[in-house]
Image (cartoon, rainbow, N blue to C red):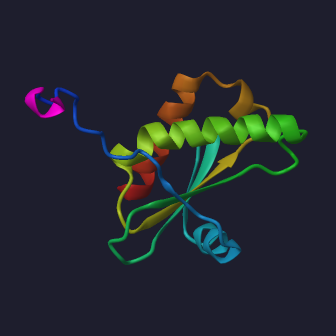
Amino acid sequence: MTGDVPDTRAPRAASSRLEVLRKRSDFLAAARAKRSSQSGLLLQARNRGDQDPLRVGYTCSKKIGNAVTRNRAKRRLREVARAVLPDMGHDGWDYVLIGRPRVTVERPFSDLLDDLRRALRQIHK
């Protein structure tokens, strides 16, 4: 008798997962394109020239610190990208977020969000 009861669940929201860059050649291509340096991160971005969904990559060198610190910085960058890129990113673009020593890990999260928004506005103007 489950057919008599209406389904009141809300429809599932679209996935907020971003496609992640994995190939070294994609990272190198982004490094040759536009960049915006902000206090908490460095953003590299390139227009691929297609209309496929945007892609994002993350990198933190050993200058950031030990493995624990680098992983924490990358987790923060992933969350910042997940919060900002679906609204402000453009289809057909690759974005690479690069962590900065000490700052990416210690900077307040709201400031990191503002840094990425400012970087995107600068790149897309």
Horizontal side of 18 relative to 90 (left or right) equals right
Which part of the image, by quadrant, shows the C terminus?
A: bottom left
Point out residue 44 in the picture as x, y percentages from the top left corner.
57, 59
Residue 93 in magenta? no
Name which residue lies at 72% across and 24% down: 106
Point out residue 13 in the picture as x, y percentages from the top left corner.
30, 40
Q: Main secondary structure of the magenta part?
A: helix
Q: Quadrant of residue 22?
A: bottom right
**Depicted 17 relative to depicted 102: above or below:** below
Name which residue lies at 85% across and 35% down: 68
Horizontal side of 109 relative to 23 (left or right) equals left
Point out residue 104 in the picture as x, y percentages from the top left corner.
69, 34
Residue 2 in magenta? yes
Name which residue lies at 50% across and 32% down: 113
Which part of the image, by quadrant, shows the N terminus?
A: top left
Numbered disc total: 0
Name which residue lies at 48% across and 41% down: 82
Front-lying residue, 49 or 51: 51
**Depicted 62 relative to depicted 32: above or below:** above
Point out residue 16 in the picture as x, y percentages from the top left corner.
41, 44
**What residue range appears in magenta?**
1-5
**Depicted 63 relative to depicted 7: above or below:** below
Q: Is residue 39 visible?
A: no
Horizontal side of 17 relative to 27 (left or right) equals left
Q: Quadrant of residue 29?
A: bottom right
Q: Is residue 124 visible?
A: yes
**Depicted 14 relative to depicted 96: above or below:** above
